[in-house]
Image (cartoon, rainbow, N blue to C red):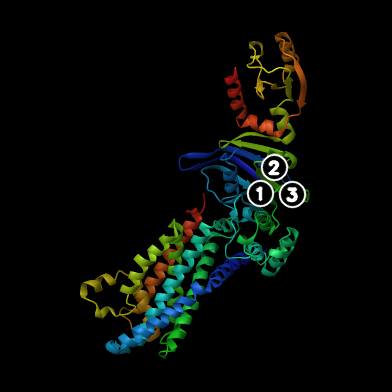
Amino acid sequence: MKPRVGFQTLVRREIVRFFSVFSQTIFPPLVSSFLYILIFGFSLGGRIQQIQGIPYLIYLIPGLLMMYVIEGSYANTSSSLFISRWANNIEELLVTPLSYFEMVLAILIGGLVRSLMISLGVYLVSLLFARFPIAHPFLVLYFLIFVSLVFSSVGMIVALFAEEFEHLTIVTTFVITPLIFFGGVFHSITLVPAPLRGLTGFNPIFYMINGMRYSMLGISDVPVQKSMFVVLFFCLALFSITVYLFKTGFKLRK
Amino acid sequence: MVSAISIEHLTKYYRNFKALNDVSLEVAEGEFFGFLGPNGAGKTTTISVITGLANYQKGSVHVFGCDVGADYRTTRALIGLVPQEFNFDPFLSAEQILSFEGGYFGIPWREAKQRAQELLKLFDLAEKRHEGYKRLSGGMKRRLLIARALMHRPKILILDEPTAGVDLELRHQLWDFLRRLNREGTTVVLTTHYIEEAEKLCSRIGVIHKGSIVALDSTETLIRKMSGDQVELFLKARLDFLPVSLKSFQIFLEEEGRKLRFEEKNDAVPKILKALHQEGIEIEKIDIRRPTLEDAFLKLVGKKDKAFVLEEGKE
């Protein structure tokens, strides 16, 4: 028996899982990103024209990409873990010799792979409308990976606390989506009234979207170092919390 | 020699409810151990603690000398669990369920797939290998559960009510299979409702009741210790109540006053026969039945008390 095989198997299982429901997991973001770019980019783009010297349609793309990374990674891990709890097949995993660290990391990687695939797909969709050089490709990868891990962890934590499926969507509707929209997917912080601008500084997604915008276009409302720090901090903190919950068996062990 | 399973003073609470109370037991390597108890007695909870599905508050649990908490990776690799409920991955086919299980236990993918094929064939599931578990019959699901637990060739196989809801033919097939597995060296721990199953398969038995171990012995000794021969006297005429002279014996009036039943101990037979003769009660037939595990079990878990209450009511 080889030590890493268990971990690789669980990663494989997570990928098999979201591929088996491809039409629910990969396809919808591609369609809706196409519609967002088409409607917002073209119709609004005609009126707004440029933000910080960038055409609005192009300005929109990094924010949309980040939005789908956040939604995809959260949806993947929250539904995977909650269904496992609900169908009780989490017990199948808990009696294996996988360490809790490996269990958590493997499920997070499932979320990461799904969101990387979605972001690649959304980027390819965006190429239908506009082409531009990527300013900092390695930073793009940095934000894709760490933001995905942040929201994959959030998904796992919510799935552990949730008692019903509805609880997963409540978090999406009332927490994640408002934070994404106020985080600047469609606008720059410079366009918002001053009081709201202050509040935006407390929204971690604001740093994620701006980090991605800097990585792709070279523009941002905050220094990129700050965005990198916020993302890394949340990633480490939430990952540690998730591993801790698994170790203590929160809502997993009787 | 290190025990396959060693539990010492295990206490487990579910909030304020004490589910296990100072449970201690040992299962030797290669043993076929039966774990009996009524519903809610603590069988599944004990198994859950051994396999890592439940936390506990006091005591210690070791598998082949390794602590199930501190060395959980080692202990879990040694155990195969057949749970009571079907807990299959809903996204996978029967073959994938087995292959992935092998993978979780560190078996390389190609080898795991091969082992899965073997077990599917052994459990007569090869034709259903591409089906999800929801499309399998109850018996097939039960076989798939056992096959899954055997993927990594565990040294200990723990089965929690494996034949619940299974038809007679499959039950006997499973019994044969488990006997063979045990002969080949696998330690088997079985919880069951079917006393007959435990009596036929297990060399040693632990009885748990209300979270405490109330008996732990070899099956034969347990039966002998707990219950004498069961004597049944069929009466020529119906009795409405027990005569006063028989009150001092633990005797039960059954079948609407046509049968007297008691346990042979302390030379009860001649004494009771003498008392019946003095009362002028005639006997039509005498049956003597060797005690079974069921008699011992019922005695241990308190059914005897219930029978006694009924008998008292008739007096």
Circle 1 SS class: strand
Tag 2–tag 1 contact (CB < 8 Å): no
Q: Nearer the viewer, residue A199 or B197?
A: B197
Q: Which residue is mark 1?
A: B158
Which amino acid type is shown beneath numbered disc 2? Phe
Of the residues shown, which amino acid type is indicated by label 3? Glu
Q: Is residue B284 visible?
A: yes
Q: Within 10 Å of the Cα at label 3, are there few (<14), some (14-19), or many (20+) other Cα atoms? A: few
Q: Which mark is residue B169?
A: 3
Of the residues tagged 3 and 1, which is closer to the observer?
Answer: 3
Q: Which residue is mark 2?
A: B33
Depth check, front residue: B211 or A80: A80
Q: Earlier in the sequence, mark 3 or mark 2?
A: 2
The count of marks equals 3
- Vertical comparison of B289 with A151: above or below: above
Label 3 and label 1: CA atoms lie apart by: 22 Å
- Residue at 73% in and 23% down: B232
CA gap between label 3 and label 2 equals 23 Å
Which mark is first along the chain, 1 or 3?
Answer: 1
Judge if badges 3 and 1 mark residues of a common chain. yes
Drawn side of residue A133 relative to residue B131, left or right: left
Q: Quadrant of the N terminus of chain B?
A: top right
